[in-house]
Image (cartoon, rainbow, N blue to C red):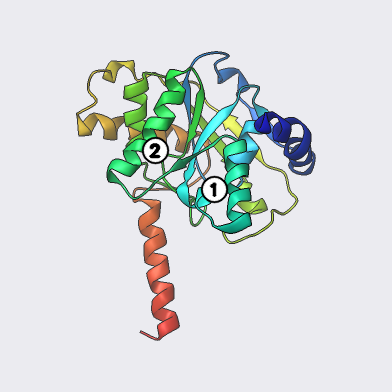
Amino acid sequence: MIYWLLRHWIVGPYITRVFRPWVAGLENLPEHGGAIIAGNHLSVIDSFLMPLVLQRRVYFLAKSDYFNGKGLKGRLMRWFFLGVGQLPMDRSGGEKSSQSLNAALQKLQEGQLIGIYPEGTRSPDGKMYRGRTGVARMVLDARVPVIPCVMVDTEKIMPIGSRLPRVGRIGMIFGEPIDFSRYYNLEGDRFVLRSITDEIMVTLNRISDQEYVDVYASSVKARVEAERTARSTGR
C-alpha cells in the first residue's frame, strides 16, 4: 500500500516531471517471474528512479544504516525505505550478510524482481569498479536471469555528499537478459562465481560509457578517506 501510494501519487509523479527519465530496452524486462536487475551505481537516487519506469515492483538491497537510525528521523527513514521496497543489507560479512541475501533470495523464489549493485557501493568518481560475487551466488541459488541496467547521469543530479538532487535529465538502459543456466549446480566453485560476476560487469561496461577499473570501489573509497584524514592531521 505504502509503495503504490508513493509510486503513483506522492514521489513518483514529482520525480518523473523533474528528471524526465528517458529509457531504452524496457522490452527486456520479463512480465512475470523472478529476475535480478544488476546495475551500475552512480548515485543514492538510483534506487528511487529506476522503479518509476517499470510496471512491476522492484526490491532493492540497501545498506542497513538506512534502517538503523534513532529517534523520529530514524523511524521515518525506516518507514520510507521499507515502503519503497528496500531490503536492509548488512555489509559486515559472515552470517549477517548471508541473512540479508537470503531475504532477497526469498523474494526471487516468490517470483519478484530484485535490484542489486554488484559493485557493492556507489562509484566514488563515476568509474565502474569490480563486482562482488554476492550477485553470482543469488543467480545460482535462485536460478533466475540477470537483466543488466545502466543508469545515466544520475551522479550529475545528485553527487555524493549532496543532500538534495539538482534539476536535470537522467536515463536508463536495460540490456538483454543474461542466462547463466550453464553454471547451475556449481554454486561452490569460486571460479564460477567470479566468472558470472565478471560477465555481468563486462556487459554493464559495454552498455555504459564508464571507464572500468579492476579494483573494488570500497578499496578506492577507503584510500581516499585515509588520504583525507592524513591531510587533516598533518601526517
Q: Are marks 1 and 2 in contact (CB under 8 Å)?
A: no
Dividing the picture into quarters, in which one does residue 159 lie? bottom right
Point out the residue furthest to the top here: 32
For the residue carrying disc 1, how many other residues have a C-alpha within 10 Å: few (<14), some (14-19), or many (20+)? many
Q: Amino acid at mark 1?
A: Leu
Count neighbours of disc 2 (C-alpha within 10 A) and say few if under 14, some if 14 to 19, many if 20 or more. many
Which residue in the structure is indicated by mark 2? 100
Residue at x-position 38% and y-position 78%: 230
In percent of width and height, residue 186 lies at: 22, 22
User: Hey, which quadrant is residue 160 in on the image?
Assistant: bottom right
Q: Secondary structure at mark 2?
A: helix
Image: 124 above or below 233: above
* Residue visible at 73% across and 32% down in the picture: 5
Q: Earlier in the sequence, mark 1 or mark 2?
A: 1
Residue 113 drawn at (x, y percent) = 51, 24
The mark found on residue 42 in the picture is: 1
